[in-house]
Amino acid sequence: MTILRLIAVMALFSAPSYAAVHQHGVGTLQVLQAGKDWQFVLQLPASDVLGFEHTPQTEAQHSAVAASRNTFDDFDVLFTLDEKCSVVETVVEVPTILTAATTHEHEHEHEHEEHSHENDKHEDFRAAYLLKCANGINTATFNGFAIWQALHTVNAHWVTMNQQSAVKLSGNQAVIRF
């Protein structure tokens, strides 16, 4: 396992240390470069991606979860790079609450109305992409604002062979310049 993969796994699955305060409308992106290897780690609130953060209740909600998973699986849908790179590995974490089967059923509609959703919690999608790039990347455009209307800002941080920096991405400014 390369050091870049180790960093990706640590970043992806150690959510409490990786995730900042959960804020609807705000995601995070970390980009790391180690030679020709580039790592993109994206984290977005489920509410911005789906419009909800609870166990899917309807067929439409189940379909939305599956469609979102497919979107996260395709790096080229989410990012446009100025150089040709090969995606070597993609790891997507769908919030468990979205993939869990309903654990109970309500016998009466009034019981459902009175049901407390105290187990509902804030959930995030996370995706890590490992790329091999023959040439260095100079710019990366995040295309997610056109996909997810509820997403307003992505706090992007990067460390490359030449610099480290940060920028707030938005629908009006979605380009990172490395």
Image: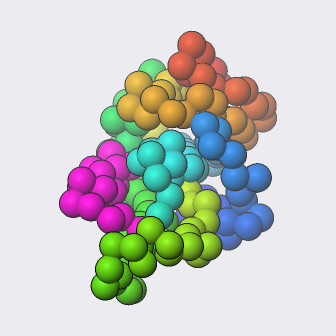
Residue drawn at (69%, 46%) of the image = 23
Q: Is 81 positioned to the left or the right of 35 in the image?
A: left
Farthest top residue?
172
Q: Is residue 123 above or below residue 72?
A: below
Residue 13 percent across, percent down from the top left: 60, 70
Q: Nearer the viewer, residue 106 or 47?
A: 106
Whether the magenta-drawn stretch holds residue 162 is answered as: no
> Which residue lies at the image location 45% right of the left edge and 46% below the top edge?
51
**Depicted 21 relative to depicted 152: above or below:** below
Name the magenta segment's main secondary structure: helix
In x, y percent, where is residue 49?
45, 45
Q: Is residue 1 visible?
A: no
Q: Nearer the viewer, residue 149 or 1?
A: 149
Extreme-front residue of the structure: 110
Q: Is residue 67 above or below residue 138?
A: below
Residue 35: image location, x then y, percent:
60, 44
Q: Nearer the viewer, residue 68 or 78?
A: 68
In this view, the residue in front, 159 or 150, is 150
- Write the start and end of the magenta stretch as one range: 55-73
- Quick check: can you spot residue 18? yes
Residue at x 63%, y 43% (from the top left corner): 24
- What colour-coding does the image apply? rainbow
Figure quadrant of residue 117:
bottom right
Residue found at x 31% / y 85%: 107
Q: Is residue 162 above or below residue 100?
A: above
- Is 72 a magenta residue? yes
Looking at the image, residue 145 sits to the left or right of residue 6; the answer is: left
Total marks shown come to 0
Give coordinates of residue 126: x percent, y percent: 52, 56
In terms of image quadrants, where is residue 103? Answer: bottom left
Quadrant including the C terminus: top right
Q: Quadrant of the N terminus?
A: bottom right
